[in-house]
Amino acid sequence: MSSALTLGRFSLGMGDRFAQQGRAQLAACQKAAAAGVNVIPVWNKSNREHLIVGSEPSGVRAEADAAVAALGWASSYHVDADHINLGTVERFIAPSDFFTLDVAGAIGTPCGQASINDFVKRYGDFGGAFGLTIGKVREAAGKYLHAVEEAGRIYRRVEQAKGAGAFITEVSMDETDLPQTPDQLLVILAALSAEGVPAQTIAPKFTGRFNKGVDYVGDVEQFEREFNDDIAVIAHAVSRYGLPANLKLSVHSGSDKFSICPAIARALKASGAGVHLKTAGTTWLEELIGLAEAGGEALALAREVYAEAFAHASALCAPYAAVIDIDESRLPQPSEVNSWSPAEYAGALRHEQSCPAFNPHLRQLLHVGYKVAAKMGERYLGTVRECEESVARNVTANLHDRHIERVFA
Ligand SMILES: [Zn+2]
């Protein structure tokens, strides 16, 4: 296992709905590297996105390899089979070297008393670490053991196909209703160790709301305490249960969570821990901003995307209902958007909180509205390619200036 594929301390998950922005995304990491900050790019695209766009996981690999070759990126990079399970993993196996095992759906499924008793027998009360008592251990085991066993089943399927050490394992539990407390995280990590899952990153659900493409909503001080406690739990679990030494937290829906960036940056600096910051759908929003700024027919297309998204808002929002908060009364009418200048469109969509024109409702609707552009097909993609300079400038600046600099630098 000494040659096992290892995820670096800082990594950035970058999604790209239409697989056009690989180079512009990588340019953000390159800019950070030039300033002495090593951020490993991880291209991710979930099964849900592939289904909506009509794309294949092999396309993400092709995009990543092409970007790396074009920019001469000499450091490591990865392709993430994002939020997969036993039912969806197969077509991701060949092109991916990073697997996000999504077991949130198995949380709370009761597991047998015998499994809980075995677990408690093996680990007891964890020596009281992080306030754990036998009662708390039993409660957490009852809630999470089944999910951990499911992670084991998915892990072993990938291991059987690719070989141990040939890929990076992430376990995600973020897409669920209740956050996992730090003491529960310790129970989960011990169980992952017992299950033989060599997780290098884990995505818990944190306190507060992580809506798509907009800022964190919640108690920032509480988040900071929890984040620091989670880091301490991970360090404890690594030394005590033999998990990979580079195990770190993964922050999903990490784009645009500007109010917690300083807390994360402080925690990383103080502890020396790493983090995987996952951004995804916002690159597509930067494409729209780039189109709007290019003006002319590109601006007209960006307006058309909004009008279509507005017309089909409820259908587009449905798959994302748990992670968006749109007040429909705050959405501008398409007729109004059709009169906007390039600067007005960009100002409403770009996430600059100090800009009075910024409209988080419009931003969230367009965030989930990529199906509209997918349906336009070549008409959309061709326009994006024609506006490469304007689009790429926005894609790179968003990742570098608004994310890398705030969390890693
Ligand atoms: Zn997630």
Image: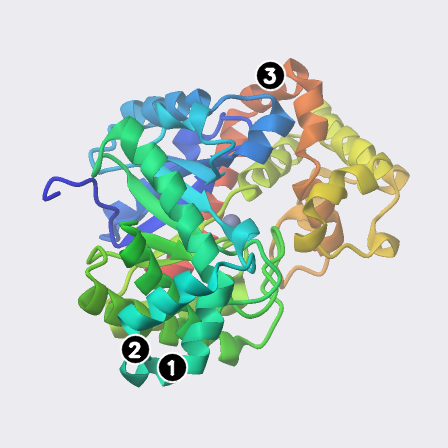
Q: Does the residue labelled 3 lie within 8 Å of ligand 1?
A: no
Residue at 65% across / 17% down in the picture?
377
Q: Of the residues shown, which amino acid type is indicated by label 2?
A: Phe
Residue at 51% across / 64% down in the picture?
143
Viewer-closest of 138 and 220: 138
Relative height, residue 157 to residue 134 (above, below) = above
Q: Residues within 10 Å of mark 2 (few under 14, many from 20)?
A: some
Relative height, residue 148 to residue 383 (above, below) = below
Contact, CB < 8 Å: mark 2 with mark 1? yes
Q: Does the residue labelled 1 lie within 8 Å of ligand 1?
A: no
Residue named by callout 1? 132
- CA–CA distance in space, label 1 to label 3: 57 Å
Q: State the image coordinates of residue 121 (x, y, percent, origin top left).
A: 30, 71
Residue named by callout 2? 126
Circle nearer the viewer, 2 or 3 = 2
Quadrant hosting residue 291:
top right
Whichever of callouts 1 and 3 sits on the residue coming sooner in the sequence is 1
Q: What element carries label 1?
A: loop
Quadrant occupied by the C terminus: bottom left
Residue named by callout 3? 382
Residue 264 is marked as none
Quadrant occupied by the N terminus: top left
Whichever of callouts 2 and 3 sits on the residue coming sooner in the sequence is 2
Q: Of the residues shown, which amino acid type is indicated by label 1?
A: Leu
- CA–CA distance in space, label 2 to label 3: 58 Å
Residue at 29% across / 60% down in the picture?
274
